[in-house]
Structures are given as structure tokens and as C-alpha cells.
Image: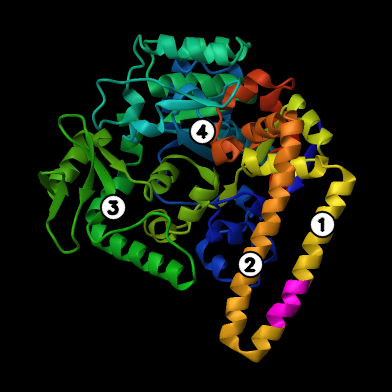
Amino acid sequence: MSFECYPITVLPHLSRLFVDYTELRTAAPDAPVRRFYAASPFDDRWMQGRSVRLQPERHVLVDALTEQAKGFGCSDTTFANLEKLRSGAKSVVTGQQVGLFGGPLLTLIKAATAIRKAQVASQRGVPHVPIFWMATEDHDLDEVNQVAFLAKHGVETLHSTFPQHRQQPVGNLALGPQIEAVLEKAEELLAYAPITELLRSSYTPQDTLASAFGKFIAGVFAEFGLIVIDASTRAFHQMGAPVLRAAIEDADALHAAVVQRNRDLEAAGYAAQVLVHDDSTLLFVMGEDGNRVALKHVVGSTEWKAGSRIYTAEELLAILDTEPERISPNALLRPVFQDAILPTSAYIGGPAEIAYFAQLQPLYDAMLGAPTPILPRLSGTLVPSAIRSVMDQHEVAFRDALTTADALSQRLAARAMPIEGKRKIAGAGNALDAELKEVEQWMGAMDSNLGHSASIAANKMRYQMNRLRRLAANWQLERESFLRKHAEAITLNLFPNGHVQERLLAGAQFLAASTLDLPRMLVENAEQDCPGHRVFDI
């Protein structure tokens, strides 16, 4: 197996904060980004773990995790890891929403990175186990009820319906008999590869989104003993209750600290990833109707609002005492809640998570006493052998594929053009540009307004020259129609619908298509010896 390494900046739509974070190793000592993270992504000191307040008794945690592991059908290796955890091992944690059929490829990549980091720390004499935190308490169904697969001529998105859903947490939603038709379509798109057996045994009508996802991700990484947690239950909320209590009792001070952190980010030239309004809090509450609603609270007020329902702090604390599962953290508090429950040495995150972790230090300091280091997950694109052959045929590199099929087909056609035509067009273009520059300079020297008008006119001429290039390329495309088909195949596989592959396409698709042991390959390559984006041939 071969792979290529590209700078992470080859990928589109990355925040400046994330890019600066990935460059911390070479950043200046006074670089603004250093203020917002506990450690560099390439600093191994995280392996020693950290002491934090509010940790539950280890046997209570492991007993709850063990009970869930039985329900997920976890491997003997997982139960062995649970016993290591009981004996004092630390953990490398990652997580993701409970997407349909395992969600996008990045889900597998995050799990593989956590496994690899735990392996490396253990090999260096500090026992660690990998834990996957399932985000089951979110209530935005549209983010988890769909999954995208490559079909013959495009991306096909499968949806499962949940008629009973309103605003309740998605993890407990039963898949129901309607999952059968969706599963059959997925099996067809995956050409009934062996991975469909795990999909079918996981996503049964009797399962919920959480239990199905847990079975699937645990099954994919059974060899490596991945521990899976659904923390929405009463048992885990009781363990994390001190964090939820602090978010109620110290709401005003915590709000002020987060607002100040956001101001600090903005002053340093960054944007806060999670917006905080005057009445924002760190909590959601589940009403008596089962719907999960954001709690609002104005600093200095005695009232907390959830929709039209008004609570006092005392009422919320009473709920926390008797029904703790009804109080849940928002995106900013969730990592702190998680690390009050688990002995986390490091969290594995993607670009968006790493960016919003910059907002969290005040919460960690106030509640746990120390922030958790966040490490970047492996970033990768998987190239099937048939697509690699086409890329090699046309000398297309990965970065060339991060465009539209039309743009790539124009490039392929320009390359395929006869040498004589290339020379004539290049000669005409170079001569025109040289002459226009001289005219623009001369006219600009006489009068600035005249020079401005000359530039506008010259650009129109350059546009027409480019139009000649496109006409010649289109003629070549008509003669060699396979060029467009090849461009469509390359971009569809590597940059589907203008998205990075790992963020859109189902991980199950690559488990089905790969000729390798894909989980093992991802784990073995999840170290940061390539600190950017890896492109793998599968």
C-alpha cells in the first residue's frame, strides 16, 4: 500500500484557528494561537495523563461501561480493555453523532486515531484504552438520519424516517420496520459485500439509532477492543452531575468567562465557533413531553426558560437530583461533562472540534482544574485502484481533483490537445499579455484614470483569449468524450459534490470496496508522521 502526504491546507474551508493550531510546532513563542490550547498537537506529554477534580469511582464507571458493552456485543478484547481501565489505565477519547449506518468515513478515522494513540501510549509504558463517545443526546434528526453512498453516476443519499420524532434526543429513536427498505438499498449500493452482514445484524427494526451505531462501530473495531459509551443514561448523568450542577449554580460566572474567551479569540483575529448570546447557557433540559429544549438564562435573573416553560434554579437542581438524565450539556459543556466521567488523557477531534476547543479552557479550569489536550484525527482520502489508474493515465494529482468535473475535464482536454495547437494558443496568449501590459503601463503613466480604463479593456481581451482556450478544449472534449467521463469519475470519488470525501461518503462504502483490512490500515497509519492530509491507495 502506498500513500501521499499533503499539507493540511490542501483541503478547502478550514478555519484559520485550526490551521494555526496544526502549525503550533513551528509557531513563534508569542503566537496568539498558543493562548488557546493546552498543548501542541505534536507534544507527547499528554500520555502522562492529568489529575482532575470530579472523577467518579473507577469501579462504578467500568461497571456501567461493561453493561453497555454486553448490549453492543463487544469483543473479548474490549472486555479486556475494560479490565485495564478498572485497574487504572487512562483513556484516549473520541466521539461522533450516531449517524445512519455508521455515518461518514471520518467516524472510522476518528476511532482509528484514538485506538492508535492509546496503543502508542501503552507501548511507552503508560496504559491507555480507546473510548468512543456516542453523541446520542442531540435532537437534530436531520444530522443523523441520512448517509451518502457513491452510486454509478453520482452521490445517493439514503434516509430513514422516524415519524415519532419531535425534539427528543435521537439516540433512543427506534429504527422500526422502515429501516428494512433503507438497509436493502444500502446492501445493493455496497454490492452485498461482507460488511453488509454487520450492517444488517446491527441495524435491526428493534434497535435504536444508538444501539445500532454502537454495535456497528464496536464490530468494525472488534480486534482493537474499542470501548463504546452512550452517556445519556441515568447512571452516567449521575457521574457527571457535578458538572451539570456547577453549570446551574455558577451560571453567571461561567457565562462571563466564556464571553470573555470569545472576545479574546476575536481580539487575536479568530472567530468563535460556538456563538454565545446574552441569554445562552451551557444546558438543555428534557421536558415532561420528552422534548429536549435549550435553557435560556439572563445574567442576574432568577428565571431559566425552556421554550414557554419557566424554571427556577432550585427546580433544575431538584431535577438533577432525581432525574439527572433530563439535564444535558450543550456543545461547549459536553467535553467537560465527558472528562468528568472518563479518565481522559487526550481527545481526538476534527477541524471543527479543535476550533471550538479554543473556547473551553475557562470551563475546564473552573470545573475540572485543567483543560484536556485535543489532538487532530488522521485526515485522509482513500483512492480505489480503478480511480488511481485513471489519475495516473492523465497525470492527475490529488490536489488537481479538488475541483468540479467541468474544470478538471477542461484541464484534461487542454493536456490532450495536439502539440501544434498548444503551441499556437500559448504563443498567442503570451504575446497578447506582453503587449497589453506595455500598453497599460504607457497609458497609466499618462493618466491614472486612463490607465484604469486601459486595464478594464485589457482584461476583456484576456477574457476573450481564455474563451479561445476553452473553445479549443471543448472541441477536444467532443473528440475524446472519455475525458469528461474520467474527470467525472475522479472528482466524484475524491471530491464528491464539492465535499472532502471523508466528510460526506459513508465509511461502510470503503469497508465494502477496499481490498485491504481497512480498519487495521487506518489504525496503523493514524500517527501524525504526516502532519497534514494523507491520500491512500486502497
> Mark 3 belongs to which amino acid?
Ala
Q: Quadrant of residue 143?
A: top left
* In contact (CB < 8 Å): disc 2 and disc 3: no
Residue type marked 4 = Phe
Q: Quadrant of residue 429?
A: bottom right
| Residue 57 magenta-highlighted | no
Residue that carries the numbered disc 4 in the rendered image: 132
Spot occupied by residue 38 in the image (x, y as percentages of width and height): 54, 59
Mark 1, residues whose alpha carbon is within 10 Å: few (<14), some, or many (≥20)? some
497 displayed left or right of 62: right
* Mark in the foreground, 2 or 3: 2
- Residue at the extreme right: 420
The disc, 1 or 2, on the residue closer to the chain's N-terminal end is: 1
| Mark sitting earlier along the chain (4/1) | 4
Q: First in sequence, mark 1 or 3: give its number.
A: 3
- Marks 2 and 3 sit apart, C-alpha to C-alpha, by 62 Å
Residue identifier under label 2 = 459
Whether residue 76 is situated above or below residue 180 in the rendered picture: below
Quadrant holding the N terminus: top right
Q: Identify whether 477 is placed above or below 155.
A: below
The amino acid sitting under disc 1 is Ala
Distance Cα–Cα, label 1 vs label 3 = 68 Å
User: Tag 2's secondary structure?
Assistant: helix
Span shown in magenta: 435-441
Residue at numbered disc 1: 426
- State if disc 2 and disc 4 touch (CB < 8 Å): no
| Distance of label 4 from label 2 (alpha carbons) | 55 Å
Specify whether 89 is left or right of 136.
right
Residue at point 70% right, 27% down?
520
